[in-house]
Amino acid sequence: MDQPKRTQPASSPPSAALAIAAVVIPPRGQDRPGTAPSADLLACQAMKEAEALAVWGSLERCLTPAEALEFWRGNEYEERHLFLARAGGEPVGMCSVTLPLRENLATAGIDVLVIPARRRRGLGRALLEHAETVARARGRSSLDSFHEVPLDAVRRDSPMVAARSGAGQLPGDDPATAFALSAGYALEQVERSSRLMLPVPDTRLARLEADALARSGDYILTAWDGHCPDTLVAGYTGLRARMSTDAPTAGMDWEREDWDVRRVRDDEQALVRSGVQTSVAAAVYRPTGELVAYSVLAWRPQVPESLLQQDTLVAAGHRGHRLGMLIKAANLRHAQEKWPPARSVLTWNASENQHMLAINTALGFRPAGYEGEWQKRLG
């Protein structure tokens, strides 16, 4: 999920010696019962949570402690490295590097965070250089990163930086935007985050469902919680692979992901270990029994008021039948019954993805912020 980078440009050298050390996380299965996470991991989590609360006023965009532990352990598909920075013995920042291991072998994900009291002292640049050095050492030549800007932080008089995709822009006076540009990163794509307040009026859902059903007679709705049925999992793997290429990625150096049944099952088990519950609505093409569309909602008991809208995809060749609306509306109905504490849904869409944005707008989603997708190619 989103981990905003809110570092600022350096204006003076660090005031104290900066020590950057890898956060050591026990391998999966080697936890001792009752053992608390390491002090370093807790310090990183505390910084992330403080940043989320300061920027957004909630933890809905932040990994929970269980998610963070599961994520930073990595897996056979992605290696993940987390580093904590201390100055004078006190935690002042962090950085991370994620390294795909099955595809996208030239890329690395980079993230940097400095606590507010220590910004504009060169710490962000030092952390970024550390992360980039790790990526270079692993032979990665294309670095990517992202950060989010709340809607109310975009002023009418802000100088704007346009995305290379040709759709969307970010305020140039945002500290993270200025930092990324100064470090040689290019803004490739802007996504819009949107919020839907719950519950959705039944009259609205009924109207949208009726319209979708009238155009989707050759398709059957199906659904599952957490574990994809064995009878559908082969088709689901194909759709997961399509998601990595069919969703707009602008000029990002991202290749098609290689999904198989084992990867789907590994992903499902990782969500269970993280404490994340999911609901999937999908559509089957009646003449062939082929799974052709799916949409995922996620809920976390630690953040009960918020649902996260994750993947939604309709396979090429089956578009134009209102399947996107059909599966989203069905999933919302189910989610409202399954997770009654939820009061809103968050989703993200590329600014150029006008079709999906139109579906979300019809459902009642409203803009909440913008996310910049940044890229730097190493010489």
Image (tube, rainbow, N blue to C red):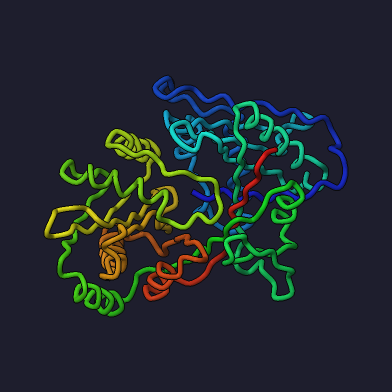
State the residue lying farthest toward the left. Answer: 287
Q: How many marks?
A: 0
Give the camera-side residue of 41 and 302. 41
Q: Residue 294: name its quadrant.
A: bottom left
In the rendered image, residue 310, in percent from the top left (x then y), is placed at: 40, 54
> Relative to residue 16, is residue 236 drawn left or right?
left
Q: Residue at x 35, y 70 (%)?
A: 199
Q: Position of residue 123 (x, y in %)?
A: 77, 40
Quadrant showing the C terminus: top right
Which x, y percent locates residue 7?
Answer: 71, 48
Quarter-wise, where is residue 293 in the image? bottom left
In this view, the residue in front, 84 or 97, is 97
Residue occupying image coordinates x 56% and y 48%: 3
Q: Position of residue 318 (x, y in %)?
A: 26, 63
Left or right of 316 on screen, residue 178:
right
| Picture residue at 78% right of the left edge, 44% below the top | 118
Q: Quadrant of the rendered structure where residue 130 is?
A: top right
**Residue at 66% across / 34% down in the picture?**
131
In the rendered view, tell whether residue 47 sits above or below residue 150. above
Q: Relative to the observer, which residue lies in front, 255 or 356?
A: 255
Question: In the picture shown, does residue 33 fall above or below 288?
Answer: above
Q: Taking 370 as reference, is 298 above or below it?
A: above
Left of 267 or right of it: where is 91?
right
Q: Is residue 158 left or right of residue 58?
A: right
